Amino acid sequence: MGPIRAILLPGAGLPAQAAYGDLIAALGPEVQAVAKDLELYADNELPADWSLDTEIDGVLREADARGWHKFHLTGYSGGGAAALAFAAKHPDRLLSLALLEPAWAGNWDWSPAYAEVRKKYDQLETLPPEQFLPAFARLGVKSDVVIPPPPDPLPSWMANRPAGIRAFLRAFRTYDLERALLAAFSQPVFFALGGLSNPDDYGDIATRLSRVFFPDFHLEVFPKLHHFDPPHRIEPARLAEMLRRHWEQAESQVVQPAETLPGG
């Protein structure tokens, strides 16, 4: 078995290296893990034509540039939604999928509680900028979780993050995550869920994906964590152990070694 190759997509908040640096260190040198920034933030100005397909194309370019024909894909929050979209369109490129509380998982089979949460996300569009981030964060956790206010002033790299989050929310309303294609994804899927995250949001997504899709689905709950204190930042060593096990098991199911593109 060769080196484990994985691409890690962050959420709409932190840059990829800041989000995943501790996790990559904990994974160790035997894992070739790439923390890939979102295409959404490739320039200071957000692209007007951005969609989840833009992130899919970015993952393909990253993998092809490294000569990786097959690899593992991990995504957190908005990056998790992009990872799901990638799995639906390019299952042949993936050895496994790891979802760290994806922010969205399609516009079908919603429970009444989840539909109410999505309605509240839609209502964020009307809020002024100074109220948007606190209201957005509040929706992601249980009602008794205390969330610190965002830094004031915001770091320079955060200047376009509120607009980026809004772009994700708009994309979720219109993107066609094809149910049949996602249901055909048979590779192992790992899902990390915070015990203090909003159960009507991320917990509902985990239940829906495990029940409707993914025959090889493993859910891991981190009881004391939530969406804004995620395991890749708060418990990187524990998550690294789980991901290595997930990836090794996925690779053991591959009969032939993963192909490598020229130069890989």
Image: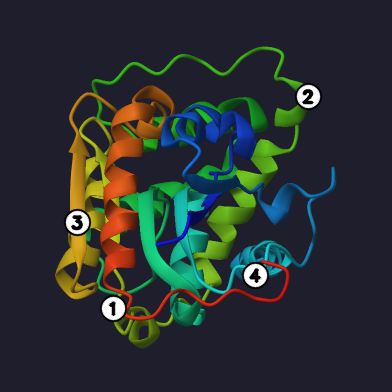
> Height in image: 132 above or below 44?
above
Residue type, mark 4 in image = Leu
Quarter containing the C terminus: bottom right
Give the image's coloring scheme.
rainbow
Q: Residue furthest left?
A: 211
Task: Residue 122: give x, y in percent of width and height.
Answer: 48, 53
Q: Residue at x 39, y 26 (%)?
A: 229
Is the residue 1 above or below the residue 232 in the image?
Answer: below
Residue that numbered label 4 is attached to = 60
Q: Residue furthest front?
A: 1
- Asked if residue 42 can be seen in this view, the reply is yes
First in sequence: mark 4 or mark 1? 4
| Cα–Cα gap, marks 1 and 2 | 41 Å
Identity, as a three-letter code, of the amino acid under mark 1: Ser
**Disc number at residue 186?**
1
Going by the numbered disc 3, the residue's amino acid type is His
**Near-viewer residue (264 or 97):** 264
Q: Earlier in the sequence, mark 4 or mark 3?
A: 4
Is residue 58 shown left or right of residue 168?
Answer: right
Disc 2: which residue:
156
- Residue 210 got which mark? none
Nearest to the eye among marks 3 and 2: give it: 3
Query: Is there a contact, CB below 8 Å, between mark 2 and mark 4?
Result: no
Marks 4 and 1 sit apart, C-alpha to C-alpha, by 20 Å
Task: Identify residue for label 3.
Answer: 218
Q: Which residue appears at 74% of the width and 47% of the height?
A: 41
Percent from the top left, x then y, of residue 157? 75, 29
**Amino acid bearing label 2:** Ser
